[in-house]
Amino acid sequence: MREKIIISLCGGTGAWERPYLEAGYDVRLITLPEQDVVTYVPPENVYGILAAPPCTMFSLARNRYDNDPRVKPRDFAAGMNSVNACMRIIFQCQDSLAFWVLENPVGLLYKFLSKPLYTFDPWWFDGIENWSKRTALWGKFNIPQRRYFVYEDRADAYNVRIRCKKRYSLRKSKIPSIADITCGGQSEKRAITPSGFARAFYEVNQ
């Protein structure tokens, strides 16, 4: 039996596709600098596509720099280059796809892709990510099963190391956010797909 091909577009760290790789799928990571989604030509018979184009130009966090002359202005056209490339690849593979999904933090991308099919926070699922970072998903896929509906039900609730001590205080009335942990920096950590969500998504999209 031929292995099912999973393409991960702009995957970066490879966290989202890891459950598929561990299960023996033919996983192909298409990300810079090795490969560019803009010029990528997909193979035939792709089974599933995971897409995570850069959120830099769509992030609400960028609002704080709107009047900062040191920061390049928001450029939707540039931001849509990767998004359009992902959607082009999805369209090319549509006849064989069992599922496809495009991810971005909740921000301004909905203005171009319409309302997302699903949004989630990392703390909803089993995994080490017990913080909030609202994320939107567009596509054709089965909704992952949420594990926690009340933050306090997590055994590790509020057990988060706050880095921005001057800006944030850890209170039991406040679910810690990814900003509490990264202090607005560590872009690589902020971009990693939560392990609990990745596993939950895989479980219902195989």
Image (cartoon, grey):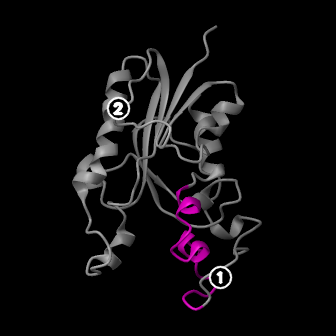
Name the disc covering residue 192, or none: none
Density class for disc 1 (Cα within 10 Å; few <14, some 14-19, many ≥20) is few
Density class for disc 2 (Cα within 10 Å; few <14, some 14-19, many ≥20) is few
The front one of 5 and 69 is 69
Give percent across and percent down for residue 50.
48, 37
Question: The N terminus lies in which quarter of the figure?
Answer: top right
In the image, 43: left or right of 178?
Answer: left
Secondary element type, mark 1: loop
Question: The C terminus lies in which quarter of the figure?
Answer: top right
Give percent across and percent down for residue 178.
56, 69
In the image, 10: left or right of 94?
Answer: right
> Magenta span covers which residues?
166-191
Say which residue appears at 64% left-offset and 58% top-offset. 148
Name the disc covering residue 39, or none: 2
- Residue at the extreme right of the image, as rendered: 155
Say which residue appears at 29% left-offset and 45% top-offset. 81
Secondary element type, mark 2: loop
First along the sequence among labels 2 and 1: 2
Query: What amino acid type is highlighted by mark number 1?
Result: Lys
What residue is shown with label 1? 172
Q: CA distance from mark 2 to mark 1?
A: 48 Å
Query: Does residue 9 show up?
Result: yes
